[in-house]
Image (cartoon, grey):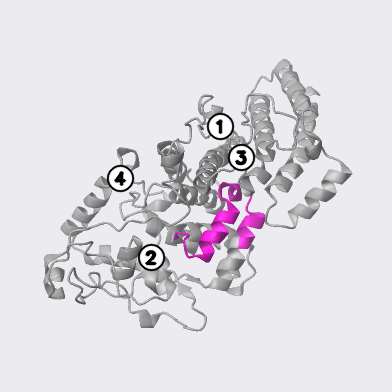
Amino acid sequence: MDASSAAAFSFQPNYVPQAREEDPEKSAASKGPKRKRLAKACDACHKSKRRCDGTAPCSNCYFASKPCNYTDASGRPVAAPNTGKPDASKAPRSSASRSKTYSEDDEPRASTSRELPNGERRQVRKRVKNHWPNILQTQEISPESPISRDDSPQDRAAPVMLDHALTRELTNLFFTHCHPVRAIIHKPSFSASLSHNGVPSHLLFAICALAAPLSRQPHLRSTAPPRLRGKLFANAVDSQLFDRSGHLISDPNLFTAQTLCLLMVHDLIAKDAGGPANSRYRDLALQIIQTLGVHNVDNVASAPAPTPDVIQASIERECLRRIFWVIHIMDLQVALYNQRPLPSSEAQLRLRLPVDETSFELAVHSTSPEYLYSPSARTHCVSELGHFIRFFSLVAHAEQIINRSETNLGTLAELEKRGEEWVSNLPDNLHFSEQNLQVQQSMFETSSNTGAWCFLLHACIPCWLHARFACCQK
């Protein structure tokens, strides 16, 4: 994936409004000449090239507290093309707090599809489906899938209140506690985009869905059990990413892949024990990052003073790789719990491992690549997450051998030897020592603690593995 193609998937908003066919009756009702530009977008969204829902006011203008006007090609005012939005007076609005009712963003899509006749709804869905590549034209979802909208209309239409204070709380809880999935988002870029209203609401909702169980807000703690406290946010994400038949209608970009990865983790947390497995979010996320070139070899030469575009492209390539590896970590956990074979092939696992957390957060794009099946360098710039993936893969392999009816002690001895070699090859800053422990404990108190989380597992997993080997040898 070269720098020019990667730059197309920037953290900055890049939504281009889509032209849609209008209902003839609605066009006649507007009593204005046919607009040559995008008929659905308001003036502000048309100027900034953002997707507009066609309501008055639209979601973008409402959240940004901007005037929302619709004009034709001659500059004359026209009516908003979409009148299916609920009355804004029914939702609490305060000009002082400028809080946002995110249900107003999500409701137009659902309400519009309910108002259209079946024939027109089918035509709209067809236009949306044909807009995407074949890889995203997925099959109809099964009834047990969470994307099948098996929730009652009352649950799905329930308002989701997310003001600025709650947004700040939940996003910081996410980056502090939601490991390892928080590693797929570059926090400095996310914070900058959030302060400029540049984060898509579906990504923000997905973050809140994972962080909601950690909040002590009374209105979030009223739901029991805790694992379901983020369900309203997850339902809001579903309504933005998928149409009624379960087809992905969001742009297949980095934001969408990150959102799908977060939904995958939330689904694993929220589903009932023994419930049917659902790989829809996982599969779509993998398809998108493969389309974006996650397995392409980096061809960015190191430069003493890289340009901002080069740095941004490097960050986005790293985020794509981290989505793949976090999905692999979750696959390992599911395989250990269900005693199933690992779904990833050896060819897929030849992808470059994540860079170290310092290089990722500070956008040091010229780090040396590391790979799963290659020896790691003993330097301070070695990947903490990469070392965790190496040893966790070893644990998964060992568990598969232990769970067999006939355990091969020779294979276990070989795995134990590999584990000891892994510990001995750790760099000095990742070895378990009193000094390193104090450093990592201080980092654990911050929201930049993925390295500290990996350090903890580096110390705990070898102890667990030695205990398992000892039990098998008795």
Q: Are marks 2 and 1 in contact (CB under 8 Å)?
A: no
Vertical position of residue 184 compared to residue 156: above or below: above
Q: Are marks 1 and 3 in contact (CB under 8 Å)?
A: no
Distance CA(mark 1)–CA(mark 4): 33 Å
Residue visible at 23% across and 57% down in the picture: 19
Distance CA(mark 2)–CA(mark 3): 45 Å
Dot 1: what SS? loop
Picture coordinates of residue 203, whole percent (x, y): 48, 57
Q: Amino acid at mark 4?
A: Trp
The answer to which of marks 4 and 3 sits earlier in the sequence is 4
The answer to which of marks 2 and 3 sits earlier in the sequence is 2
Of tags 1 and 4, the one toward the viewer is 4
**Residue matched to label 1:** 340
The answer to which of marks 1 and 3 sits earlier in the sequence is 3
Q: Amino acid at mark 1?
A: Arg
Q: Main secondary structure of the magenta part?
A: helix
Dot 3: what SS? loop
Of tags 4 and 3, the one toward the viewer is 3
* Residue 298 is at least partly visible in this image: yes
Residue range corresponding to the magenta coloring: 172-200
In the rendered image, the residue lying farthest to the front is 304
